[in-house]
Image (cartoon, grey):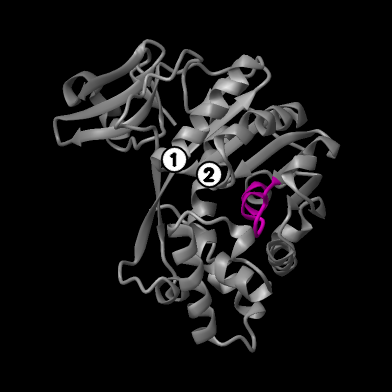
Amino acid sequence: MAHFPDFSALLQECLVGVSRRELAGRAERLSAHYRAGGASAAVVRDHHDGLAYALVRMPATFAAVSRVMRMLAEETDFDPKTMLDLACGPGTASFAAALQWPRLQERILVDQNGALLGVARTLNQASATGAVGAIRYLQQRLETTSQLPAADLVIMSYALVEMAPAQIPTLVGSLWQLSAGRLILVEPGTPLGFGRIRLARDVLIAAGARIHFPCPHEAPCPMQEPNWCHFAQRLPRSRDHLALKAANVPFEDEKYSYLVAGRERPTKAIEGRVLRVVKRDRASVHLELCTPTGLARRVVSRRAAGAEFGRWKKLVGGDGFVAGNGTPDG
């Protein structure tokens, strides 16, 4: 299981004088609202709501966004100096970027919800990430993104799913214009979330963007209903997280769909992206891949892989696949 920061510990100093019972009640109200398809602006109304949201959702969304950023850093030489975090919420993506790219010189966090921006500011002030470059906090709507400066890294996570499909092409076009390097979109790994990512992908390709992740091609998406493209990141649950979610399993698997686009072709070609590991045993690994020619299944045997078989057995959904040199990528 990957290691991620304990956000509940980071938030402890913000919770002085806050009733845990009250926080649990707010967390349950938030969870019920999101399960019903509600948007954050309607339910996160003050600083305590923002803290409850951060405790309940930030560990999982941070895990997903961090995985995407880590893959981008490992498979490319991308090293951004400026960042725009749009619909930033409690600053999850900005926090992850500061840990992944500590040479960032400027981060601009934008959200229409002042309570969530306040939590983002509090988190940065309470952690080492607050010292990573200059930070600006802007309370404004996404419709005004065209007024923002371009940045090396533009990211928006868990926001498209709250929008009507008709709004997405214009917004994604604006995000692409702001991106001087890479544009990252992350959404819940649900059919609805993937549908938003797929629509954004079509818009970006039409605008001349190069798709870097997860797709190893820019052909029409081969995924057919009832399937959808999504991945999962496992993360541990802290004691506070378990209590607020009334959970008894010490971990959770955050399912997410995502897209990374750039202005140039990827420098490192892969044969395919692992969608899921169908089966692994002592003799072989069975993989389901997305490839430039469509969906495919590959079997890697211990006999053929030899000493590299141990690496193949560690593959998980989202990893790159390079068969030409007999080794997985990443």
Residue 89 on the magenta span: yes
Report the residue marked by disc 1. 192
Q: Nearer the viewer, residue 329 or 18?
A: 18
Task: From the viewer's perspective, tell me whether residue 44 is left or right of residue 3.
Answer: right
**Within 10 angstroms of label 2, few (less than 14), some, or many (20 or more) residues?**
many
Q: Nearer the viewer, residue 132 or 180?
A: 180
Magenta segment: 86-97
Vertical side of 256 occupied by 168: above or below: above
Residue 76 on the magenta span: no
The answer to the question of whether label 2 and label 1 lie on touching residues, with beta carbons closer than 8 A, is: yes
Residue 137, given in percent of the width and then of the height, sits at 80, 55
Vertical side of 213 occupied by 23: above or below: below
Name the element at disc 1. helix
**Within 10 angstroms of label 1, few (less than 14), some, or many (20 or more) residues?**
some
Q: Nearer the viewer, residue 156 or 112?
A: 112
Q: Quadrant of the C terminus?
A: top left
Residue 271, given in percent of the width and then of the height, sits at 40, 16
Q: Nearer the viewer, residue 104 or 257?
A: 257
Q: Amino acid at mark 1?
A: Leu
Inter-mark Cα distance, 2 to 1: 7 Å
Report the residue marked by disc 2. 161
